Image (tube, rainbow, N blue to C red):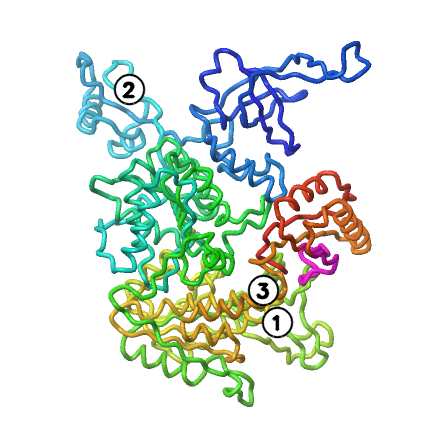
Amino acid sequence: MIVRVATEIALNKFFDYEVPPQMERLISIGSRVKIPFGHREVLGYVTEVIEKTTLTAPSGEGMLPGTEVPVKLKRIIKVIGEQNLITPKVMALAVWMAGYYCCSVEVALRSLLPKMVCREQEGWKKQLYIRYNQGVPEPDKLTKRQKEVLDFIQQKRELPLTQLTTEMGCTSDIVRRLEKTGKVTLAPLKILRDPYANLELIPTQPRKLNPAQETALRQIVSAMDAKDRGQVKPFLLFGVTGSGKTEVYLQAIAHALEKGQGAIVLVPEISLTPQTVERFKARFAEGPLRTQVAVLHSHLSDGERHDEWHKIRKGNARIVIGARSAVFAPVDPLGVIIVDEEHEYSYKQESEPRYNARDVAVVRAQKEDTIVVLGSATPSMESYYNAQKGKYTLLTLPHRVDNIKMPGVRIVNMSSEMRMEGVPQFSTMLKEAIRLRLDEHQQVILFLNRRGYATQLQCPACGYVAYCPYCSVALTYHRRECLLKCHICGYQVKAPYNCPECNEPGIRYKGTGTERVEETLAKLFPLARIRRMDTDTLKKKDDYQKILRDFGLGKIDILLGTQMITKGLHFPRVTLVGIINADISLHRPDFRASERTFQLITQVAGRAGRGNEEGEVIVQTFTPWAPAISYARDHDYVSFYEEEIQHRAELFYPPFGRLVLITILSQNEELLQRVAEELRRQIETRVPAEALHSLKGPVPALLERAEGYYRYHIQIQTRKMSVLSRHLFDICQEFRCPEEVNFTVDVDPVNMV
C-alpha cells in the first residue's frame, strides 16, 4: 500500500511513502502520520492512496526515454490517532482553498484542525479515579481507618482520588494499600473539558411559525430531502431583525437530526457564541432528537478545543456552533450548514490562508452534497446579487414575529446642534429620549464604534499631534489608565500633561470614544446604572456573558458599546437605541463604506422594540442625506441595494468584478518600492490578459505604515479568479524577495486599508 503525504513543511509538494502491512487497516485519506523526511522525522497528512510510484527515466541513462523506473520508498513510522483526522471531503475542500486563495496545500491543511489535535502526543486530560470492585472478596485484615475509607468508596462506587482524599481526610497511601487487596482499582480516566457545562438550561419546544417562516422552512426541508442535493442552490434567508430566522434554523436542524445527519452553525462573533449555544442546547436538551452541542472558537483553551473537536469526530455531538474555523468541523454525515449574519466581515481570515468562511461554507456544501443557508437582515451585496441573478434561492421574512412593529428611526443633523464649545456628544433629542426611558424603567443601548476617551492628543499652540512611532495613525487617549495607545500595533506611552514639542500646558484631547461617553452619561444621569462594553472592559473570559446576563436581569439601565453590541442581542425591555456618531464608518476610504454603515445602523437599530413596548432609534449624523443613513431610517434594504449596486457596476467592484489585494511590506521604503515595481512587472507579463481587467499600483497603502513596516498595495480586478489565482500562486512561489521585504496575497479582501 502506497500513500501520498502532505508534510507540515509548506513546500507545496506531496511525497509518496510505503505503508507497513500492520498499519494498512489504520490508514485512509486524512490520516495523521509520522514519516522520515531527510535526516529527521516530521508529521503529515495522507492526501491520497495510490497503486504505485515510478519515475520517468531521462535520456542518457541507458534506458529508453520515458521508461518507468521503480522507486524504493521510505516507510511510514507511525499512524497518529484512532481514526483519520480529516475526512476525504474536507481534504478536498482544503485542496480547493489552496488553489483559490493562493496558498500551499500544507497551509490550508493547517487551518483545519486545532493545534492540540495535531500533536503526536494525546491531548486528553486525565485524572486518577478509584473504583470499587464488587465481586472481589472482602479482605480479612483491615484497619479501622481502611474500613472507613473502603465503605466510603463502596457508597460512591467510583470517584476521583482527589475527592476521596479531600472528603475523607486521608492520604493516597491508604488507597494504594487498599488497591493491593484487589477490592479497589486506581486508574487514570479521561476527563472531558466542557466550556459550557455550567449553563442552566430550560428546555424549549419548537414554536409555531408564521406563514413566511413556514414557506422558508418548507423550501429548505424539501431541498434537504432531494436526491441530488449537490445541485441545490444555496439559500439566502433575508429576514428583518427579529423576524425569527433562528427558529427556522432550529427546525431545519431538527429535520437533519431526524435523518441521522448533523449541522454546522457559524456565528460571526465569538461573543455571540454563548447565547447561541444556550438557545441550541435548550432546544435539543431532551426528547428523541437529544444530542450534544459542540463549540469551536479561539477563546476556548487548547484543551477545551481538543475535547470539543474529538466529541464531534467521534459523532457524540451532531451540532457544532462556532466562529469561522468551525466551518471545517468534522461533522459526518453533514445535513446542513448555516451561516448567520452572513454579511459580517469577521468571517474573513486575515492571516494565511485568507479564506472567507461564508464562501468556504458554500463550497463545502457542494462537496458534501448538502444544504447551506446564509442568513442576514442586511445581506452582503455579493449574496443579494447572487440571489437576484438566480445563483442563490432567496427566502424572505419581511416582518417581525408576533406582529411586533419595527422601531421608528429618527435622524438628528448634528450640524444644527453646534455650540460655542463645539459639537455635543448627545443631541437634545437623544438626551430627552434617554431620560424618558429611565423614568419608565426601560433599558437603553448606545452605540459608538470607537473605543478610548479621545481619538487624538493635539497642542493648540504649535499644532503637535501624538502619533504612533511605528504606525501612521494618531494615538488614542485612554483616560482611566492615563495612556496614549495605538490600536494598530498596541504601542502605548504615558499621556503627557504638557506638549512634548513646545511645553504648552493647555494640551487638548479631540474626538470622542466610548470611555468619554461613559463619563458624560454618569454626569447627565447620575442615578442610572451604566455599563460600557468594548475590548478595554472585557478582560476576562466570561466578562461579556456576565454583562449581558446582568443586562437581561435588569441590573443595567444603559448599555454602551462598540460593534459587539450591534447584533444577535435579544432584550425585550430595550426600547431605545442611540447611535452616537453614524459617520465614523461612512467616510472610510473603502468602496464598502456605505454598505458597512447601512448594515451597522440597521443591525443596532434592530435591538430596539423586541418586546411589547414599541422601540425607537435615534441616529446622530452630519450627513443625514447619505443613502446609507436615509435608507436605514426606513429599514429599506432593497432601495439601498438598487442605488449602491449601480456604483459598483460603474467601477467594476464586487459583485461584478473580483478583487485581489497584494500588500508589500518592508522597513526599507526605497527597497520596498523597487520590489513592488518588479512584482507588478511579473504580474503584467505572466498573467493572461483576459484575467486582468485592471492592475493598479504599486501605491502606498491607506495605512502607509504599520508595526514599523511601510506598506504598498497592488490591486487587481478580474472576471476570472480561478485563472488569476493559479498564475498568482506560481508567481508567489517563484518570485525572489530580498529578506527585508515580504508580501501577502489577499483574494476577495474585505479590508482595503
Looking at the image, the residue that sits furthest to the top is 62
Are the two marked residues, 3 and 1, in contact with CB atoms closer than 8 angstroms? no
Vertical side of 253 occupied by 32: above or below: above
Residue 706: numbered disc? none
Which residues fall within the magenta stretch? 694-716
* Dot 2 amino acid type: Thr
Q: Residue at x 70, y 42 (%)?
A: 732
- Distance between mark 3 and mark 1 Cα atoms: 34 Å
Say which mark, if any, is on residue 456: 1
Q: Who comes first in sequence, dot 2 or dot 1?
A: 2
Quarter of the image containing the C terminus?
A: bottom right
Q: Earlier in the sequence, mark 3 or mark 1?
A: 1
How far apart marks 3 and 2 lie (CA) works out to 71 Å
Asked whether, in this view, residue 169 is left or right of residue 530, the answer is left
Question: In the rendering, at what x and y percent does residue 687 appear?
Answer: 72, 46
Q: Which residue is mark 2?
A: 185
Q: Describe the element under mark 3 as helix, strand or loop.
A: helix
